[in-house]
Image (cartoon, helix red, strand yellow):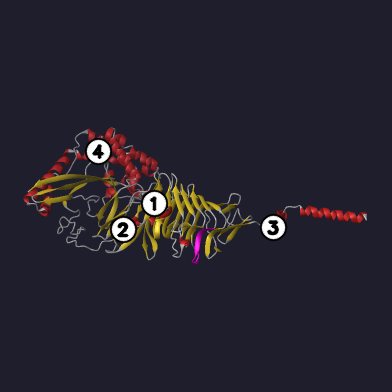
């Protein structure tokens, strides 16, 4: 009996002990599942630290309901909920953060990018790009909050069905605070017609929506603006912007894109505002349903098109910038421009100015209303139609320079920094002090670091864009020169005389001016060099002599027997060297050799560019006949 009693006692203890163990001790092999799916993968307690099995690009912290993205390469698969598929599905409230780029790659007809079914969604310091889905960022019936420095881009959400095709939407409330949100080319805008409330607030908020087909880009019917936040509507272009009044956006794409067309050569020129820290620009056209890059090696804020533009044709053009090594093509496409090449219009004299604007429509002029052109045209050398040799770059090998003078060996073997230092050292000899030194220092800086501006030059090979610059102080100094003043005075006086002699016939007065100016001898402007101040005060180094000049009628009006208008005087020279410049005594100066090497040495691949000094003066005139 004692033996049996002992056995029963042990069994009883065992039963009690097992009963008292926690349930989780038996469930150790069964992972906890969360109502969150990334692609076709459900988040569990086992995979939460590496949901996609790629080293941890997506992680989930259930204790604070935080889903973190570290730029996963691909989200594979989809999950279906109700009648919709989604790339990311959450059926419990969740916060998302990190970096994520999403582009639809399935053939499903109803796929949402981020879909929260019956739960709140918070995006916190989340940088996400969503493109091409049938719905963007959506919460069904609950709330969406975008906060703390989010950068949200939603593009090409174009499922024309119901409210699920929102770019960003919910039947609940949406709050955007201290974040940047961009929506473009979508069927429905931000907080479409079913949203009950949209609040945009904060001191560092920027929200932009454009190219929306159905309804307003931003639903203003349910919009509440926070303090210091303003709504800007551009109804003509279909763009709504809500932004903090003190918002300072760091722009990574070109703006103020302009286009000029030359119907003679069927070429055009694009210009745009420079982007801070951009080292390259690219240009693309939309053709046959795709964006096609034309070039991506533009280093200035202008571009000359090929000679293949067809009159009467419309082009959609995008210009992108590379900032800190990254191309912003999304914003370039978002801010693309549409240009239409004018249909051919009468140009009787074939000078590129149609008869409607040509001051002298039956006489060929390289500049509209041209009164005088010096033998040396701007940017052109001794051979007509060829770029001047002192403006060429990247065209001498080390052997070719050694053939000019053996002293070039010292510069060929020097570093770029040393060459720039030698070049700048010329100021110590030819621009000793004062304003002249400031002028030369400015010109050398533009040679080394670029001018940021360009001018179109007509050559035998078509239009070429060359760097140019106007030094304000040098411009003023040149205009005050006695010979320049005499030149301006003579041209103005002679033109007025011709208008009066020809009884107000502007065309006949214009045609007489070329010979008259040449015969006066005033057109050959040679600065006074009779003092040491010219040589050592910076003028010799900065300009020495003018290469040429032109005068044209900028505007003119004739009323009865009176007339008035403005003459445009353009003087120019080249801040660069050609071979004859270093075959003179100057080859013995290291600074001049350094200058030539920086400009012409093919090892630098055209990095350092000479430029055209351009000085434009507009002089009014008037009189009676």
Q: Does 218 sit above or below residue 420? A: below
Residue 230 among magenta residues? no
Helix, strand or loop at label 4? It is: helix
Q: How far apart, in angstroms, are the residues tagged by discs 3 and 1?
A: 53 Å
- Is the residue marked by circle 1 packed among few (<14), some (14-19), or many (20+) residues within 10 Å? some
From the image, state whether disc 2 or disc 3 is nearer to you.
3
Q: Is residue 131 left or right of residue 473?
A: right
- Pick whichever, 133 or 222, lies toward us: 222
From the image, state whether disc 4 or disc 3 is nearer to you.
3
Circle 4 is placed at which residue position? Answer: 539
From the image, state whether disc 1 or disc 4 is nearer to you.
1
- Pick whichever, 207 or 601, lies toward us: 207
Q: How far apart, in angstroms, are the residues tagged by discs 1 and 4?
A: 51 Å
Q: x, y percentage for residue 512?
A: 10, 52
Q: Residue at x 80, y 53 (%)?
A: 16
- Is the residue marked by circle 4 packed among few (<14), some (14-19), or many (20+) residues within 10 Å? many
Q: x, y percentage for residue 541?
A: 27, 39
Circle 2 is placed at which residue position? Answer: 305
Numbered mark located on residue 452 in the image: none
- Is the residue marked by circle 2 packed among few (<14), some (14-19), or many (20+) residues within 10 Å? some
- The magenta region covers 106-117
- Pick whichever, 125 or 244, lies toward us: 244
Circle 3 is placed at which residue position? Answer: 29
Instruction: Find out whether the residues at labels 2 and 4 contact each other: C-beta distance under 8 Å.
Output: no
Residue farthest toward the right in the current orientation of the protein: 1
Q: Is residue 177 left or right of residue 19?
A: left
Q: Residue at x 28, y 49 (%)?
A: 391
Question: Is tag 2's residue or tag 4's residue first in the polypeptide sequence?
Answer: 2
Circle 1 is placed at which residue position? Answer: 241
Q: Is residue 196 left or right of residue 505?
A: right
* Quadrant showing the N terminus: bottom right
């Amino acid at each position: 009996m004692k033996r049996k009693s002992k056995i029963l006692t042990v069994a009883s203890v065992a039963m009690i002990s097992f009963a008292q163990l926690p349930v989780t001790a038996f469930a150790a092999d069964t992972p906890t599942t969360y109502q969150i799916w990334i692609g076709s993968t459900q988040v569990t307690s086992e995979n939460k630290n590496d949901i996609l099995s790629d080293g941890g690009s997506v992680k989930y912290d259930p204790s604070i309901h935080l889903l973190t993205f570290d730029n996963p390469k691909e989200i594979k698969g989809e999950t279906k909920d109700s009648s919709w598929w989604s790339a990311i599905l959450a059926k419990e409230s969740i916060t998302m953060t990190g970096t994520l780029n999403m582009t639809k790659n399935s053939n499903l007809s109803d796929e949402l990018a981020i879909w929260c079914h019956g739960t709140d969604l918070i995006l916190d310091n989340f940088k996400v790009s969503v493109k091409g889905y049938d719905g963007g960022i959506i919460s069904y019936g609950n709330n969406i909050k975008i906060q703390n420095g989010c950068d949200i881009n939603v593009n090409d959400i174009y499922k024309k069905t119901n409210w699920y095709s929102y770019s960003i939407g919910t039947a609940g409330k949406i709050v955007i605070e201290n974040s940047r949100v961009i929506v473009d080319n979508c069927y429905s805008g931000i907080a479409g017609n079913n949203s009950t409330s949209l609040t945009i607030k904060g001191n560092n908020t920027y929200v932009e929506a454009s190219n929306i087909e159905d309804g307003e880009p931003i639903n203003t019917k349910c919009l509440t603006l926070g303090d210091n936040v303003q709504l800007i509507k551009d109804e003509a272009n279909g763009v709504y912007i809500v932004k903090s009044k003190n918002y300072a956006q760091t722009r990574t794409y070109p703006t103020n894109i302009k286009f000029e067309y030359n119907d003679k050569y069927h070429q055009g020129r694009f210009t745009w505002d420079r982007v801070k820290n951009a080292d390259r620009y690219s240009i693309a056209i939309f053709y046959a349903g795709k964006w096609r890059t034309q070039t991506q090696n533009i280093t200035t804020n202008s571009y000359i098109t090929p000679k293949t533009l067809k009159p009467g044709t419309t082009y959609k053009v995008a210009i992108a910038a590379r900032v800190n090594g990254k191309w912003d093509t999304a914003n370039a496409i978002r801010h693309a421009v549409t240009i239409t090449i004018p249909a051919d219009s009468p140009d009787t004299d074939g000078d590129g100015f149609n008869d409607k604007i040509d001051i002298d429509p039956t006489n060929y002029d390289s500049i509209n209303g041209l009164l005088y052109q010096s033998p040396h045209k701007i940017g052109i050398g001794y051979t007509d139609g060829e770029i001047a040799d002192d403006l060429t770059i990247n065209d001498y090998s080390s052997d070719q320079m050694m053939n000019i003078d053996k002293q070039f060996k010292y510069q060929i073997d020097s570093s770029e920094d040393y060459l720039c230092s030698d070049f700048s050292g010329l100021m110590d000899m030819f621009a000793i002090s004062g304003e002249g030194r400031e002028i030369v220092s400015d010109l050398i800086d533009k040679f080394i670091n670029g001018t940021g501006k360009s001018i179109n030059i007509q050559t035998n090979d078509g239009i070429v864009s060359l760097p140019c610059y106007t030094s304000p102080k040098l411009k003023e100094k040149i205009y005050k020169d006695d010979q320049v003043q005499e030149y301006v005075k003579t041209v103005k006086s002679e033109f007025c005389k011709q208008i009066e002699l020809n009884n107000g016939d502007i065309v006949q007065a214009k045609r007489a001016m070329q010979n008259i100016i040449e015969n006066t001898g005033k057109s050959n402007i040679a600065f006074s060099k009779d003092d040491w101040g010219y040589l050592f005060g910076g003028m010799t180094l900065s300009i020495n002599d003018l290469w040429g000049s032109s005068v044209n009628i900028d505007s003119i009006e004739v009323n009865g027997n009176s007339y008035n208008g403005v003459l445009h005087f353009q003087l120019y020279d080249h801040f660069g060297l050609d071979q004859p410049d270093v075959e003179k005594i100057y080859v013995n100066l290291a600074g001049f050799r350094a200058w030539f090497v920086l400009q012409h040495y093919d090892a630098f691949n055209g990095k350092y560019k000479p430029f055209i000094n351009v000085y434009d003066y507009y002089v009014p005139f008037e009189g009676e006949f």
